[in-house]
Image: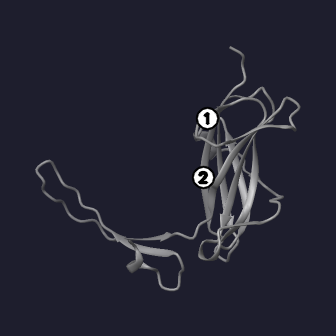
């Protein structure tokens, strides 16, 4: 689709010029807007290609179940979100934010994951990516309730340090019926 619009000297960047025009109820066109130049960068980190939630037993350390992440799923007890962060050039930093509302993510304090663990690779050749599997604590024990929203931000390990983010949400129901 965008092969003809590659930005010279910039791998994975594409450019488009965009203009807009309004049409009224009588199908009459207004004036065209000024042209806006926009670049799209396809070389951003990928977050959550592999994603699971890990539920722990009452002791808080024994894994009770590992489930594929489904947005807004219901969980109980101590839970971690486990996901991949990856890029062709590798990952420099991962941060996450947790809040009780989606709007609360904007003012939530970010946490840098200091120990990313051992770097892994996925795919091969032109599709090979490097990155990490990270665990983000969503509930420390069985007192969590309501919805938890998570925003994960990954920074690629390159001169441009391009970032990408992804949002996740889960529901907790720890009260007996």
Asked whether 169 or 130 is in front, the reply is 130
Q: Quadrant of residue 80?
A: top right
Residue shown at the point (72%, 58%) measured from the top left: 94
Whole-percent x, y for residue 38 in the image = 43, 70
Whole-percent x, y for residue 169 in the image = 62, 40
Whole-percent x, y for residue 30 in the image = 18, 60
Residue shown at the point (60%, 71%) measured from the top left: 127
Residue shown at the point (61%, 36%) measured from the top left: 101
In the picture of the structure, the residue carrying the numbered disc 1 is 73
Q: Quadrant of residue 99?
A: top right
Q: Are marks 1 and 2 in contact (CB under 8 Å)?
A: no
C-alpha separation, residue under disc 1 versus residue under disc 2: 17 Å
Indicate whether 103 appears above or below 111: above
Q: Quadrant of the C terminus?
A: top right
Secondary structure beneath label 1: strand
Residue shown at the point (68%, 59%) measured from the top left: 85
Secondary structure beneath label 2: strand
In the picture of the structure, the residue carrying the numbered disc 2 is 166
Q: Earlier in the sequence, mark 1 or mark 2?
A: 1
Camera-nearest label, 1 or 2: 1
């Amino acid at each position: 689709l965008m092969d003809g619009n590659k930005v010279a000297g910039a791998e994975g960047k594409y450019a488009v010029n965009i203009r807009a025009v309004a049409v009224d109820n009588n199908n009459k066109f207004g004036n065209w807007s000024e042209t806006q130049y926009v670049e799209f960068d396809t070389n951003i980190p990928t977050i959550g290609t592999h994603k699971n939630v890990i539920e722990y037993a009452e002791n808080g350390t024994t894994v009770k179940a590992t489930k594929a992440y489904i947005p807004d799923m219901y969980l109980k007890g101590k839970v971690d979100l486990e996901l991949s962060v990856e890029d062709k050039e590798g990952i420099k930093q991962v941060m996450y934010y947790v809040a009780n509302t989606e709007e609360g993510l904007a003012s939530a304090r970010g946490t840098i994951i200091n120990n990313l663990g051992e770097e892994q690779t996925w795919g091969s050749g032109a599709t090979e990516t490097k990155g990490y599997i990270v665990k983000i604590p969503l509930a420390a024990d069985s007192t969590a309730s309501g919805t938890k929203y998570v925003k994960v931000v990954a920074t690629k390990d390159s001169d441009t340090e391009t970032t990408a983010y992804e949002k996740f949400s889960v529901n907790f129901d720890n009260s007996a019926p």
